[in-house]
Image (cartoon, rainbow, N blue to C red):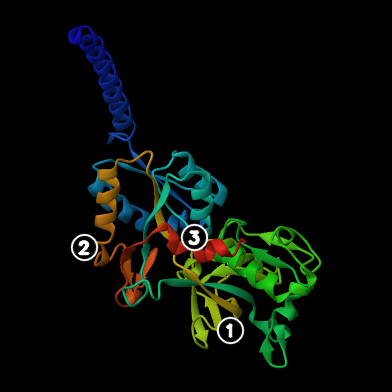
């Protein structure tokens, strides 16, 4: 009797084991390492020709990590970069915290790898800065009782970067909403002309937003320090403080090449969490992701002068080296303070 029911049971178990093996093989195949190129997508801010050497430097370390050729996908719109990494059409991206959050909302397969540390080499000072700036000769118009005030921006035109920009939209609009709380202005309303700012522009990049202000297309502009650092230099005051005056460098590349010598003043400065490198884990193997992370956080990369360009070198780069800057591993929860801005 036992043999009569053991045989069918063995058959069922065999089928189940084959099905399980087949499923495992399919999953393994879906995430298996490929000889196809690794696609790296960049925001408009990092898509300019002047950033070519920096992009090439990352190609070298990503090729070393994966054994795959790297293709750069340059963009003119934040939304394109976000959709590319969320859909798996790109394997890796460098994006702001807000862009990462939007991509992660679209696909949980998008996860952060690393962020740049602060000068201390830790996450304690891993921030950059969101600026609101105005032309130098108009700066006094934005003071009330001798202090810069958002009240003085009411009725002016303003330029943001993109609705998906952290420092070029999410952070400054949060400050504006909090400051003008009695008016009940919303983030959505700030995307177009409204009761506070009759005209709202978008520069599509931090450089573009700054140029809008310098060319007087807008009265005020939001953009970040790191994205314009290669084009401008401080001429008066302390860096990243209200009242600091910056000037466009004589040899500034496009789109600042026709604006040499133009000066602007900061009227508001807000620290922002540093931007992450992120991957879509559905199109990379676990081994590839681990290798990428290990290489990025290595001393070798921290000391790579093509990645972290010495501040006094005069060279253009995505990241500058002033002290102990390096890449550090970071988890999704690190970006929760940016998520809170949308609540």
Q: Earlier in the sequence, mark 1 or mark 2?
A: 1
Mark linked to residue 199: none
Mark 2, residue position? 300
Q: Is residue 229 above or below residue 78?
A: below
Given residues 219 and 283, the one toward you in this image is 283
Identify which residue is drawn at 53% across, 58% down. Answer: 98
Identify which residue is drawn at 78% across, 74% down. Answer: 182
Q: Is residue 162 above or below residue 152?
A: above
Element class at badge 1: loop
* Contact, mark 2 vs mark 3 (Cβ under 8 Å): no
Q: Is residue 32 above or below residue 310?
A: above
Identify which residue is drawn at 27% across, 61% down. Answer: 297
Mark 1, residue position? 242
Given residues 10 and 82, the one toward you in this image is 10
Quadrant holding the N terminus: top left
Estimate the x, y position of residue 65 in percent, counting from the top left: 24, 48
Mark linked to residue 97: 3
* Contact, mark 1 vs mark 2 (Cβ under 8 Å): no
Identify the image quadrant of residue 181: bottom right
* Contact, mark 3 vs mark 1 (Cβ under 8 Å): no
Q: Earlier in the sequence, mark 3 or mark 1?
A: 3
Given residues 241 and 20, the one toward you in this image is 20
The mark total stands at 3
Identify the image quadrant of residue 28: top left
Query: Is residue 255 something that shows in the picture?
Result: no
Between disc 2 and disc 3, the foreground one is 3
């Amino acid at each position: 009797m036992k043999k009569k029911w053991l045989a069918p049971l063995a058959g069922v178990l065999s089928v189940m084991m084959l099905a399980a093996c087949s499923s495992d093989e399919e999953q393994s195949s879906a995430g298996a390492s490929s000889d196809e190129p690794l696609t790296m997508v960049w925001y408009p801010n990092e898509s300019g020709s002047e950033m070519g050497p920096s992009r090439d430097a990352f190609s070298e370390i990503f090729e070393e990590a994966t054994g795959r050729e790297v293709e750069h996908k340059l963009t003119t719109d934040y939304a394109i970069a976000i959709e590319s990494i969320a859909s798996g059409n790109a394997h890796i991206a460098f994006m702001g915290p807000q862009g990462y959050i939007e991509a992660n909302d679209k696909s949980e397969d998008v996860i952060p790898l690393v962020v740049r540390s602060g000068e201390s080499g830790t996450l304690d000072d891993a921030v950059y800065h969101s600026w609101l700036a105005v032309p130098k000769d108009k700066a006094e118009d934005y003071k009330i009782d001798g202090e810069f005030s958002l009240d003085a921006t009411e009725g002016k035109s303003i330029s943001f970067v993109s609705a998906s920009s952290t420092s070029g939209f999410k952070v400054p609009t949060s400050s504006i909403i909090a400051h003008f709380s009695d008016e009940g202005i919303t983030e959505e309303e700030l995307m177009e002309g409204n009761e506070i700012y009759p005209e709202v522009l978008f520069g599509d990049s931090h450089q573009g937003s700054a140029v809008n202000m310098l060319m007087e297309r807008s009265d005020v502009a939001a953009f970040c320090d790191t994205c314009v650092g290669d084009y401008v230099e401080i001429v008066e005051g302390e860096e990243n403080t209200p009242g600091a005056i910056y000037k466009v460098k004589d040899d500034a590349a496009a789109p600042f090449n026709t604006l040499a010598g133009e000066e602007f003043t900061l009227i508001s400065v807000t620290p922002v969490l540093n931007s992450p490198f992120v991957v879509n884990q559905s199109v990379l193997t676990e081994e590839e992701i681990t290798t990428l992370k290990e290489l990025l956080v290595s001393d070798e990369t921290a000391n790579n002068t093509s990645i972290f360009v010495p501040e006094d070198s005069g060279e253009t780069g995505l990241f500058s080296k002033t002290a102990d800057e390096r890449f550090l591993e970071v988890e999704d929860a690190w970006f929760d303070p940016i998520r809170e801005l949308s609540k």
